[in-house]
Amino acid sequence: FTPLNPPNVQFQLPHTAGNRPASPEPLGGMLALLTGLYEDDIAAIHIHRGLADYQETFESQFCYLPHDAVVPGMLAKSNVSDLVTALAPTPLWLAEPVDALNRRVNETDLANFTRSLAGPQLRFTPTQAEEAAIAEWLLAKLRH
């Protein structure tokens, strides 16, 4: 529900409560991925604005990742791409993925991320998807 930060937002400036960049909200997406790993009866997973890469959180001195979205010990062993790979063949749709600074993942980074993961059960959309298309996709997966 958080609005995306524009690509040119200045994270290094001192911020007050009124001008602080929006934090990503990856908890729901991470919960969906982890649930898919541990539950056998998951028909499909749809994640909107999930974090594409947790490791990039450590590439900057600015951390806007909420504490409730950090799974203790997970980053030492895996990343989002590892979870996505482990979920196969569960159908998965990642719509409008974001980076650790709550910016839309650019086309180049999305292509690099999806290159090794792309398959018939994995779907990416870099922009917001139509709700009707998501509902139709989920219904089709539930009918199988």
Image: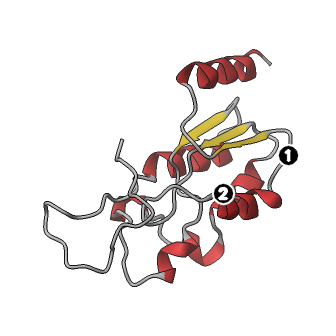
Task: Give, as a three-letter code, the residue at label 2.
Answer: Glu
Q: Residue furthest front?
A: 8
Which one is in front, 104 or 41?
Answer: 104
Please indicate whether residue 46 sits to the left or right of residue 21 in the image.
right
Q: Residues within 10 Å of mark 2 (few under 14, many from 20)?
A: few
User: Which residue appears at 66% of the width and 57% of the height?
Assistant: 107
Question: SS of the residue at dot 2?
Answer: helix
- The label number, if any, that marks residue 139 in the structure image: none
- State the CA–CA distance, disc 1 to disc 2: 18 Å
Residue underneath mark 1: 119
Residue reaching furthest to the bottom:
61
Residue 15 in the image: above or below residue 124: below
* Rendered residue at 50%/47% (across/down): 49
Choose the circle earlier in sequence order: 1 or 2: 2
Q: Amino acid at mark 1?
A: Gly
* Quarter assignment of residue 121: top right
- Residue positioned 73% across, 18% down in the render: 140
Please give the count of numbered marks on the rendered protein. Answer: 2
Expressed as whole percent of the image width and height from the top left, the position of residue 14 reads 20, 79
